[in-house]
Image (cartoon, rainbow, N blue to C red):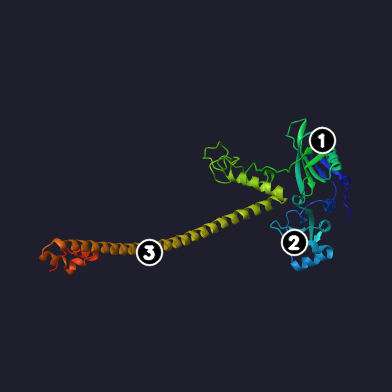
Amino acid sequence: MSDIPECSMMDFQTQDDISLTNNNSLNRLVLALSSKDFKEINIVMSHQTGGSRIPKMNPLALHTYIKQKISQSELITNMRHTRQGKVLFTTSDPICAANLLTLTKLLDVPISATVLWENITTKFLLTDVPTATSLEELASELACSNDIVITHMRRFVRQNTQPEAAPVLITILGTTLPEHIKMWFIHQKINLFIDRPRMCNKCFSFFHATRTCNLNPACHQCGQIHTSSCQSPMQCINCKGNHSALDKNCPHYIKEIKVLEYKAQHHVTTGEARRILNQRTNTNLATIVKSNTCTSDLENTLTTKMEALFQKMQEKIDQQMAAMLTMFEKTFDSLLQKILQMFSGAESQSSSPNRKKVATKPHLVNMNISNLRKTLDKGGTTASA
């Protein structure tokens, strides 16, 4: 299939020069993805009657029906019923996706099909665009001077103001953002646009817009419903912390920033980004608990081994001390015997016959340190009875 030239996609529809939409059919825009980078295309089918849900269908009957209607049905990689009562088909083939968009029925259920733009588009912001330049003029220049297909544009202008310039948010086909764009004589570097968290002005929830909220207005200071000035302690309605629901340091606000960053960087819906990040948080918590358990087991094992090692070292030291004490006693005994022999030899030359008899008595000549210690411990003397 030949690529569709970007200049041929310049069929735009504007509303009060605040927003612009590509007026080409969904099928043609999806077919233009053949020359763009993307991971997958998700086609969402809703009941044609607003508010009604598509009933759960027999998978075999639905599979047979799709095979009959879509010639590239083998390129459908997934199909599932959503919690909102819709059916979602996933494919990586633009032709298959375009054919799915032509369906008006699923079995006997009338449906309308659309595409999830978050999976196949990316956004960037142009700042200080002159308000005298119409969005259609800007879109035509960007499409012809750059390799991009514009799907949506929005100019940010505060109500009741008439600025000379204002930022313009541009959505293009494909998930790869060019580093620069050209428009007239301007060569400008661009960055991925990441939206800021948006909060319901009635109940201060991050999960829906103010226009769809059915709850009574709550106080952003205490989270309660009252009409008079707030007299209650400050408490965030989202995290229950002691701060206002409008506090930018609220953990829920910081978490929502991460959700929107993930959404923009990975080209998924806000709900899908929340689900993935919540799963990661639970996985990290389980990993920490498992890691703590493993650490505790390792500490117990190391403690047991260290105690066994210290016990062996103590036994070895006791053995060495006993051996040294035995060697010391033997050495001292040998020295004592030599000293006694020396005294005995000296007295034998100068002593009387009676002293010679005493000096030559066996219990004095053969006395050793062990016997001497035992005798002294008993409180006795070395003389024989």
Q: Report the residue at 65% width, 51% height from top.
A: 274
Give SS at disc 1: strand
- The quadrant the C terminus occupies is bottom left
Q: Is residue 206 visible?
A: no
Question: Along the horizontal axis of the image, is 286 left or right of 315?
Answer: right
Q: Residue 77 appears in which quarter of the rendering?
A: bottom right
Give SS at disc 3: helix
> Circle 3: is it few (<14), some (14-19), or many (20+) Cα within 10 Å?
few
| Amino acid under disc 1 | Ile
Nearer to us in this view, 244 or 382: 382
In the picture, the disc for residue 315 is 3
Question: Along the horizontal axis of the image, is 128 left or right of 2?
Answer: left
* Mark 3 or mark 2: whose residue is earlier in sequence: 2
Q: Is residue 31 visible?
A: yes
Q: Return the x and y of residue 89 as percentages of the image width and height.
A: 76, 59
Nearer to us in this view, 347 or 87: 347
Give the residue pinned by disc 1: 186
Give the residue pinned by disc 2: 78
* Mark 2 or mark 1: whose residue is earlier in sequence: 2
| Closer mark to the observer between disc 1 and disc 3 | 3
Q: CA distance from mark 3 to mark 2?
A: 69 Å
> Circle 1: is it few (<14), some (14-19), or many (20+) Cα within 10 Å?
few
